[in-house]
Amino acid sequence: MPKEIRGLQGSCLVIPCSFKEYVTRLRVLWVTKKGGYMFHTDPVDVLDNFKGRTRLLGNLDEQDCTVEMDNVQTHDNGPFCFRAERENERYSFNNSCVFIIMRAPDKPVMSSLPEDIEPGTRVAVKCSVNHTCSSHPPQITWSVPTARETISHSHMGGGVWETVSAVTFVPTGYEEKDEIVCTAKFWGGKTQENTAFLSIRSKYRLIELHPICVGFGPYAIVSSLVFILICVLTGVFIYKRQHRFVCFFGLYLCFRMSAFKFKSL
């Protein structure tokens, strides 16, 4: 049993506990510093402050006295000590007391991502987070659509568990944000997240522009007509202002000034 275990306010925590003596028909007692019961096999004997918040997870036939505390509060700091009794016999055990240290939720850890990812390529990434509530592990979500997800849980020792989400996703190259976010939501509602930069080759390409007078078809005709209209309007404006105008369309060039006169053919 660990001497200290981390607690997250409003969440739950699981205190791992085991003993070697093989004694049947035991009643489990988790005792506070003042002698009250944080947990008792008979719920009537549990302190009001802990009623409905503690339960036995372990199997006594397997010498497992693991207990869960839900909705952890800042004053739930312990120490809490494991005891047992059978009829008129009482049992105490060495190193059977634990303190609860309140801490903020752990921040998720993400695996590294490759650089210069080709759009359409499958990318694998992991997000892991430590916690002390194995009965209600954190829920891990992603900011990108995932193709496949694998969730695993493992005991790291000392009352700490690790939850890992391994996913694959396929970037398109048109992502609105150049990042991927992993969010861990802990039992009780608190969240923590981590962000990694996405280096994806963009699918956007420069469009080669061609002169409007090249080619045939409706687009070329409409573009030419617009150009003619602009040319005419510009010529009229210049003519009125300076009594001369320049008009250019294709290979035709016309230059007129007020000093010259038209000759009729």
Image: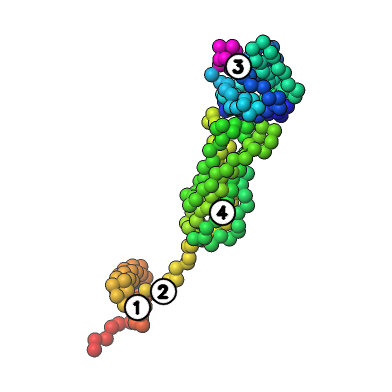
Q: Is residue 46 magenta?
A: yes
N-terminal-most mark, 1 or 2: 2
Circle nearer the viewer, 1 or 3: 3
Name the residue tied to disc 1.
215
Image spot of residue 141 (x, y percent): 52, 42
N-terminal-most mark, 1 or 4: 4
N-terminal-most mark, 1 or 3: 3
Any mark on residue 240, and which?
none
Name the residue tied to disc 2.
210
219 in relation to 74, above or below:
below
Residues packed near mark 1 inside 10 Å, few (<14), some (14 to 19) or many (20 plus): few
**What is the C-alpha distance between the residues marked 1 and 4?**
48 Å
Determine the secondary structure under disc 4: strand
Q: Nearer the viewer, residue 32 or 65?
A: 65
Q: Is residue 221 magenta?
A: no
**What is the C-alpha distance between the residues marked 1 and 3?**
90 Å
Q: Amino acid under label 4?
A: Ala
Span of residues in magenta = 41-51
Residues packed near mark 3 inside 10 Å, few (<14), some (14 to 19) or many (20 plus): many
Circle nearer the viewer, 1 or 4: 4
**Contact between labelled residues 2 and 4, with CB atoms less than 8 Å apart:** no
201 in relation to 21, above or below:
below
